Amino acid sequence: MPLVEQIDYGVLLKEESMEIRQYEGFNVAEIKKEGKNVMDSGFNDIFRYISGGNESSEKISMTSPVLSEIEDNSVKTSFVMPKEHKFEELPEPIDKAVQIRHVPKGIYGAIRFAGSWKQEKFLNMSGHLRLWLESKGYEIVSNAIVARYNPPFTPPFLRRNEILYEVRKKENG
């Protein structure tokens, strides 16, 4: 049983370490950081928000995974807000670079793997997932999203990492 609340999803298809998942809508606090090698640079900003760095000084429980969406020259880091918090009730961040956003219901392809975060591993796993999604008749409609479930002090062989892509069935597939 996880120590913190985890995002809910239903598995529509599973083969080895890859899945097609249905996520219901959820809320996130997120920040976008420009530049290379910024995978962890937004974590502390959002952690301050959930630790009371908001207009009501409210502490918000940590959840997992931490999501990092890779864009051209930036990374958007997001914390999923606990289910008990409705979107309209989430406090405003003091740091205006931190945004609150609702992620609508969607279908995602996912691949799970253990270990430390390395660019080479990301490219390898991402490639496997892309090929599998293509073979199942899905097209990718999002940037790569990295989901990391464990704190940094977790031994690498016990860490749960995932790469996600939002997908939709190809019209001719």
Image (tube, rainbow, N blue to C red):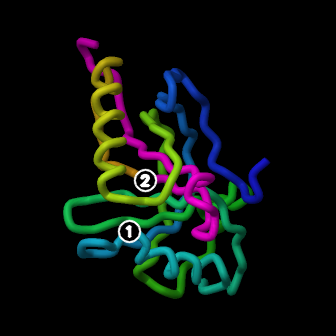
Q: Residues within 10 Å of mark 2 (few under 14, many from 20)?
A: many
Q: Position of residue 75 (x, y in %)?
A: 33, 66
Looking at the rendered structure, the kind of residue marked 1 is: Met
**Numbered badge on residue 125:** none
In the image, the segment drawn in magenta is: 147-173
Going 20% across and 61% down the picture, which residue do you hit? Answer: 72
Please, which residue is most extreme toward the top here?
Answer: 172
Q: Position of residue 63 (x, y in %)?
A: 66, 61
Badge 2 marks a residue whose secondary structure is strand
Q: Which residue is mark 2?
A: 146
Q: Is residue 139 above or below residue 160?
A: above
Horizontal side of residue 77 vs 140, given as left or right: right
Going 58% across and 77% down the picture, which residue do you hit? Answer: 47
Name the residue nearer the viewer: 156 or 18: 156
User: Looking at the image, is mark 1 or mark 2 earlier in the sequence?
Assistant: 1
Q: Is residue 130 above or below residue 118?
A: above
Horizontal side of residue 110 vs 149, given as left or right: left
Q: Which residue is mark 1?
A: 39
Q: Position of residue 119 (x, y in %)?
A: 31, 58
Going 52% across and 80% down the picture, which residue do you hit? Answer: 44
Please, which residue is most extreme toward the left here?
Answer: 72
Going 29% across and 48% down the picture, which residue do you hit? Answer: 123
User: In the rendered image, which quarter contains the C terminus?
Assistant: top left
Q: How many marks?
A: 2
Q: Position of residue 17 (x, y in %)?
A: 50, 32
Badge 1 marks a residue whose secondary structure is loop
The reply to whether the magenta stretch includes residue 148 is: yes
- Tell me how far mark 1 sits from mark 2, CA to CA: 9 Å
Name the residue nearer the viewer: 74 or 97: 74
The reply to whether the magenta stretch includes residue 36 is: no
Q: Are marks 1 and 2 in contact (CB under 8 Å)?
A: yes
